[in-house]
């Protein structure tokens, strides 16, 4: 995710020499510095020294130790801290970094890798308007940004857009498998499923009409699409999607308790 953000920022015109990256994995740093003219280090404190903005992009499991080790520098410099870690509440970050730290908690998704991400962001009261727009411009380099006022909505964002790409892939897989059953080769079924998903999303993005209306437009009474849609709905498609999102949001709440515990 950090690599995608760096790529997006540079493509957006940010000066690579203003970006410093720290990682414990030297091969990862080597790969990054081969792609971008940025400064890399194995020392988190060196990366943070003098920074106006610190982006924390480690796994949730290691966030506590990474943040605690940066507490001294962060309390002294008071930078804006942006976390992209799933499940870590801003209160936990402040507990580890310093109680008055300006924290933007964000939940991007993997299409950020192709600059088509959807990121939900929450700013705590210590974040200034200027820092808010800096945070937004950083995450906007990899897709769209939605601000939420209530941090608990982060679990809903995790369920909808954070985990969402996997639901889309599953639907494409199911279309491909059914296409195979109807007689297409694996490759042709995949290509038709993929381009159909892409075309439908592009159409919806470019249209002023909502998805429901677009669907109704392509569903002629008594036609093939209607037969398929009825079959999906009779099988409880919408209820199943709703159940899946509720389950994901619940899991997100559980993980927040697990990773964000400040004991
Ligand atoms: N991937 C997604 O779809 C997605 C979506 C939304 C949010 N996120 C969040 O984004 C964060 C990063 O996810 P990711 O998939 O990009 O993980 P990742 O590929 O494992 O990247 C994290 C990097 O941090 C390094 N690291 C580990 N401990 C460190 C330390 N003490 N100091 C400095 N660097 C350290 C890791 O090195 P090692 O490999 O050596 O451990 C790794 O290179 C996670 O918190 C995740 O919840 C991810």
Image: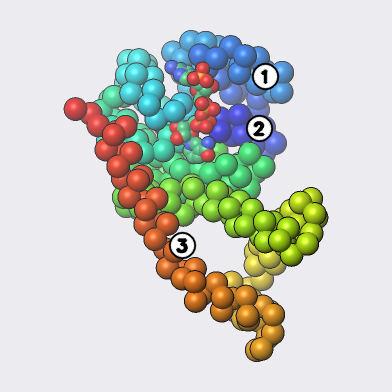
Disc 2 vs disc 3: which is toward the camera? 3
The answer to whether 121 is drawn above or below residue 184 in the figure is: above
Secondary structure, mark 1, is helix
Q: CA distance from mark 1 to mark 3?
A: 38 Å
Work out whether mark 1 precedes mark 3 in sequence or the reverse, and give the earlier one: 1
Asked if labels 3 and 1 touch by Cβ distance under 8 angstroms, the answer is no
Question: Is disc 2 surrounded by few (<14), some (14 to 19) or many (20+) residues within 10 Å?
Answer: many
The answer to which image quadrant residue 227 occupies is bottom right
Q: In the image as oriented, which residue stretches furthest toward the left?
A: 263
Q: CA distance from mark 2 to mark 3?
A: 33 Å
Q: Residue at x 55, y 11 (%)?
A: 41
Residue occupied by mark 2 = 7
Residue 71: percent from the left, percent from the top?
Answer: 32, 19
Question: Is disc 3 surrounded by few (<14), some (14 to 19) or many (20+) residues within 10 Å?
Answer: few
Secondary structure, mark 3, is helix
The answer to which image quadrant residue 26 occupies is top right
Is 146 placed left or right of 92 in the picture?
Answer: right
Q: Which mark is residue 31?
A: 1
Residue 21 seen in this snapshot: yes
Q: Residue at x 46, y 62 (%)?
A: 241
The mark tally for this picture is 3
Secondary structure, mark 2, is helix
Q: In the image as oriented, which residue stretches furthest toward the bottom?
A: 221
Residue occupied by mark 3 = 241
Q: Residue at x 35, y 15 (%)?
A: 69
Asked if labels 2 and 1 touch by Cβ distance under 8 angstroms, the answer is no
């Amino acid at each position: 995710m950090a690599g995608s953000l760096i790529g997006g920022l540079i493509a957006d015109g940010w000066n690579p020499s203003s970006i410093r990256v720290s990682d414990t994995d030297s091969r990862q740093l080597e790969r990054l510095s081969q792609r971008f003219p940025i400064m890399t280090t194995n020392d988190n404190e060196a990366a943070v020294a003098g920074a106006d903005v610190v982006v924390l992009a480690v796994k949730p499991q290691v966030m506590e130790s990474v943040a605690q080790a940066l507490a001294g520098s962060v309390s002294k410099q008071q930078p804006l801290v942006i976390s992209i870690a799933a499940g870590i509440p801003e209160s936990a970050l402040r507990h580890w970094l310093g109680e008055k730290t300006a924290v933007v908690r964000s939940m991007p998704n993997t299409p950020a890798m192709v600059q088509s991400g959807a990121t939900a962001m929450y700013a705590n009261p210590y974040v200034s308007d200027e820092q808010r727009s800096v945070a937004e411009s950083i995450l906007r380099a990899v897709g769209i940004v939605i601000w939420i006022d209530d941090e608990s909505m982060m679990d809903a964002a995790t369920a909808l857009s954070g985990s969402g790409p996997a639901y889309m892939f599953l639907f494409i897989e199911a279309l491909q498998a059914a296409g195979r059953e109807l007689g297409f080769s694996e490759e042709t079924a995949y290509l038709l499923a993929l381009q159909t998903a892409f075309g439908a999303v592009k159409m919806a993005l470019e249209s002023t009409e909502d998805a429901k209306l677009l669907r109704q437009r392509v569903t002629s009474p008594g036609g093939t699409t209607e037969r398929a849609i009825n079959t999906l709905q009779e099988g409880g498609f919408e209820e199943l999607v709703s159940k899946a999102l509720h389950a994901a949001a619940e899991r997100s709440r559980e993980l927040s308790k697990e990773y964000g515990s400040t004991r």
